[in-house]
């Protein structure tokens, strides 16, 4: 399992659980996150959803071992649209708090930006390195991040690949 889910009363805790690879988001983790966020959409007695990352980093972004594993970019994009973690988080955003620490890179900032509340500790750093790979942010960050920090800060992250701290 790449995601731990624990319910205590009306609270649901969802934790990224691949600390050995800095919680890099792979296909299995994506699918498990979508499944975990379906629970509060079907159970309104869950009034709080908390998203965590185990280990030193919240999420170092997409798992580079999977880059280029789809036959073509269109197929890869279609799967991400069909299994969208961002859409799943957005569906319960009013009840969701993302707790960020350490590296929050690529999807590691794009996805939590969909949460209603984001809490980052002093160790958190943020970057969108896709430009250095010739890519655009693909986990919904072109929508979620500008809503959270504005278009100018998003442009700084997305066009330069620079890392910023809290």
Image (cartoon, rainbow, N blue to C red):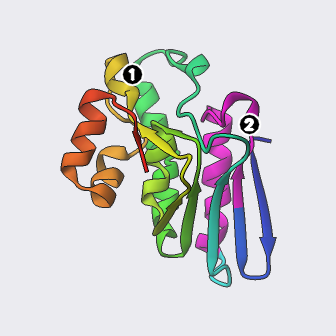
- Crowding near the residue tagged with mark 2, few <14, some 14–19, many ≥20 C-alpha atoms within 10 Å: some
Percent coordinates x, y for residue 3 in the rendering: 73, 48
| Left-right relation of 30 to 114 | right
> Would you say residue 98 sits in the magenta stretch?
no
Q: Residue at x 52, y 58 (%)?
A: 88
Outermost residue to the bottom: 45
Q: Quadrant of the N terminus?
A: top right
Residue 73 image label: 1
Residue occupying the point 34% across, 30% down: 162
Q: Could you tell me which secondary element the residue under label 2 belongs to? A: helix
Q: Is residue 22 left or right of residue 83?
A: right
CB of mark 1 within 8 Å of CB of mark 2?
A: no
**Label annotation for residue 19:** 2
Element at badge 1? Answer: helix
Residue 2, percent from left and from top: 74, 41
Q: Is residue 72 above or below residue 144?
A: above
Q: Earlier in the sequence, mark 1 or mark 2?
A: 2
Give the residue displayed 56% in from the left and 34% down from the top.
60
Q: Quadrant of residue 139?
A: top left
Q: Please tell me in which quadrant of the rendered image residue 41 appears.
A: bottom right
Magenta residues, start to end: 14-42
Q: Position of residue 136 (x, y in %)?
A: 31, 30
Q: Horizontally, is 20 left or right of 62 in the view?
A: right
The residue under the point 43% across, 46% down is 110
């Amino acid at each position: 399992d790449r995601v731990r889910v624990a319910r205590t009363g009306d609270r649901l805790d969802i934790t990224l659980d691949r600390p050995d690879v800095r919680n890099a988001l792979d296909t299995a983790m994506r699918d498990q996150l979508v499944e975990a966020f379906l629970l509060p959409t079907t159970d309104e007695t869950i009034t709080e959803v908390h998203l965590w990352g185990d280990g030193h980093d919240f999420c170092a972004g997409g798992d580079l071992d999977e880059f280029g594993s789809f036959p073509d970019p269109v197929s890869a994009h279609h799967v991400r649209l069909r299994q969208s973690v961002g859409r799943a988080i957005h569906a319960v955003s009013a009840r969701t708090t993302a707790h960020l620490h350490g590296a929050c890179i690529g999807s590691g900032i794009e996805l939590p930006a969909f949460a209603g509340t984001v809490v980052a500790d002093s160790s958190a750093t943020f970057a969108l390195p896709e430009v250095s790979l010739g890519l655009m942010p693909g986990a919904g960050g072109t929508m979620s991040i500008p809503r959270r920090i504005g278009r100018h800060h998003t442009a700084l992250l997305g066009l330069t690949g620079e890392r910023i701290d809290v």
